[in-house]
Image (cartoon, rainbow, N blue to C red):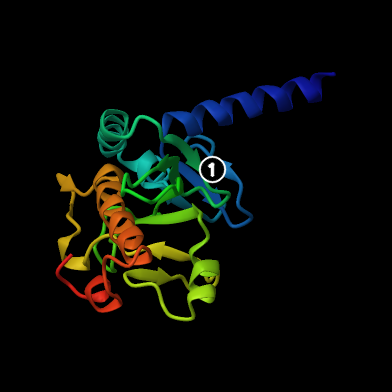
Amino acid sequence: MPFQDAAAERRKQLAAQLLRGEEVMVTQQGAIRSADEHDGNEVAITVPEGKLAARSLYWYERDPELLQGEVEAMQHFFPQFRRDRLPDGRMSWLGSLASGVPGSHRLWHLQVVYDHDHPHNDSYGGSINVYPIEPDLASIEAELGEPIPHTLRHQGSGELSICTVEAGAFRSNRNHSSTAASSLAWAAKWIAAFELWMLGELSSRDFAGHRI
């Protein structure tokens, strides 16, 4: 099978050439030629030496140092949370918190979700959102018949997240960004306020205000 052997050899040569990032010629039909294969009569454009762009959609692949900082902070402050990924590739943490407020017995199951373009402070809570899985805030809101203070309703899903921090307070520069651990700390403060509100120790006005 000399023809098949020649085709296999050509594929190997082409693969090696691409992996080396060498300069190549591309014909009008899209075939790849090395410079010494091009006879000069065939119209072809030169692709200079270099590699294909490989910027990942996911911040944790683009910036492994930032990822390591997030992991270390979570392992130190909230080791009961485990890392997870949503179907669309967003990184998250899953775990539970309890407020410790006397008279409150809720266990809050939370999911901390990073935006694809973490870190940024373009919105309230910045690029990290804290979603209560249980209790279901939407159901509680419906029972109360009034909005729950300091929550965000997300377009599309309609889910409520805890509004952990004002947009300007979320640190988002490359060298010092807010972490999931700091967002969870703000969420714990919100949970304590929520429980005190439900127990009648905080008025709706106080809870909705900007003093907490």
Q: Is residue 50 visible?
A: no
Q: Quadrant of residue 193?
A: bottom left
Residue that label 1 marks: 39
Q: Is residue 1 above or below residue 170?
A: above
Q: Quadrant of the C terminus?
A: bottom left
Q: Quadrant of residue 51?
A: top left
Write the residue at 43% across / 41% down.
Answer: 96
Q: Quadrant of the N terminus?
A: top right
Mark 1, secondary structure of its residue: loop
Which sits in the foreground, 135 or 71? 135
Which sits in the foreground, 31 or 174? 174
Percent x, y of residue 24: 46, 41
Write the residue at 36% across / 63% down.
Answer: 199
Q: Is residue 29 left or right of residue 55?
A: right
Percent x, y of residue 81: 41, 35
Percent x, y of residue 130: 39, 55
Q: Is residue 84 left or right of residue 73?
A: right
Q: Is residue 208 visible?
A: yes
Residue type marked 1: Asp
Write the residue at 48% across / 75% down.
Answer: 144
| Within-10-Å neighbours for mark 1: few <14, some 14–19, many 20+ | few
Residue placed farthest to the right in the image? 1
Which sits in the foreground, 29 or 131? 131
